Amino acid sequence: MTSRAKTFRLIFALAILAAMFSSPSFAQQQTPPKKKTPTLRTEDVVKPKTEEVIEEGTEKVEGKPTETVVSETGKTKDNPEESAWRDRVKLARQRAKEAERVAEETELRVTDLRNQLGVSGQTTQDRNSNAVELEETGKQLIKLRAEARAAAADLEKLLEHGREKGFSEAAGPSATSEDGKPNEDYYRSRHQKLLEEFRTAERRVDLYENRVRELNQKIRGSSGSGDNFFIAQLAQDRDEAQQKLDEAQEARNKARKELDDLLEEARRAGIAPGVFRQQ
């Protein structure tokens, strides 16, 4: 090929390339697309309301507003469920104590009536009257013991429920008030509680002394019967009653000492003796 032909072919190729670069389709393919300018809408600025607004002073539990545990004064309030449980426990404890007290006093009355039947010098009318009362009171005692056991069981169920929930009974008043002075309510309530414990222990001392005495009499009366199984059962009952008697005596001594200590503590704190009267 001649040099002239080569030159002509080169010019022709350059012309074709120039035409391709200048065409609109090629420019459209090579030019990168312009980015879309972002725009803001109202819903992009204001977050949609997807859940209920919880007012100040409440806390949200499982998506529901619940009562706050902080009072207006900034002090922690009790859980409403725990407060209701405490009220139920307080009533149940009172019922259990009262039922037990009545049953124990009735048993003491039965023992007293039984002893009266053995007193010489009574008229036939007096003896018959005591016998009738003894029979009626004995039947009543069976019923009262059952009621006391049921009340104690109800109390234990409530206490077990509280343990499962992590509840605790309300604490009593503190020894000093908010201004740092001795709190009369503390000394009064503490004295009342200890006095109740002392009286309960005294009643049980009498109760178990009677049981031990009666069981010993039955053991002596059955010693020649040859019924070793019955005698062994009486001895076991006597030993259990003796253990209860020892516990009651220890509780009485403890309550008496704590009462004396409380009175001395109150005296040193400047509490007037009149605070403890009529209890």
Image (cartoon, grey):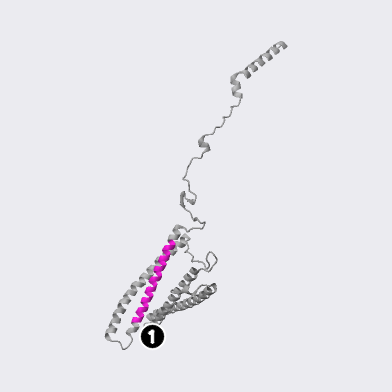
Residue 194 in view (yes/no): no
Dot 1 lies on which element? Answer: helix
Residue 74 drawn in magenta: no
**Residue 118 location, x and y as percent?**
33, 86
Q: Is residue 225 left or right of residue 164?
A: left
Q: Name above or below for residue 58 compared with residue 121.
A: above
At horizontal 37% and vertical 80% (from top left) the residue drawn is 230
Characterize the magenta stretch by its predominant secondary structure. helix
From the image, tell me which residue sits under label 1.
220
Which quadrant does the C terminus fall into?
bottom left
Residue type highlighted by circle 1: Arg
**Residue 164 location, x and y as percent?**
46, 61
**Residue 52 location, x and y as percent?**
46, 45
Q: Quadrant of residue 151?
A: bottom left
Q: Which residues are magenta?
A: 85-113
Q: Quadrant of residue 235?
A: bottom left
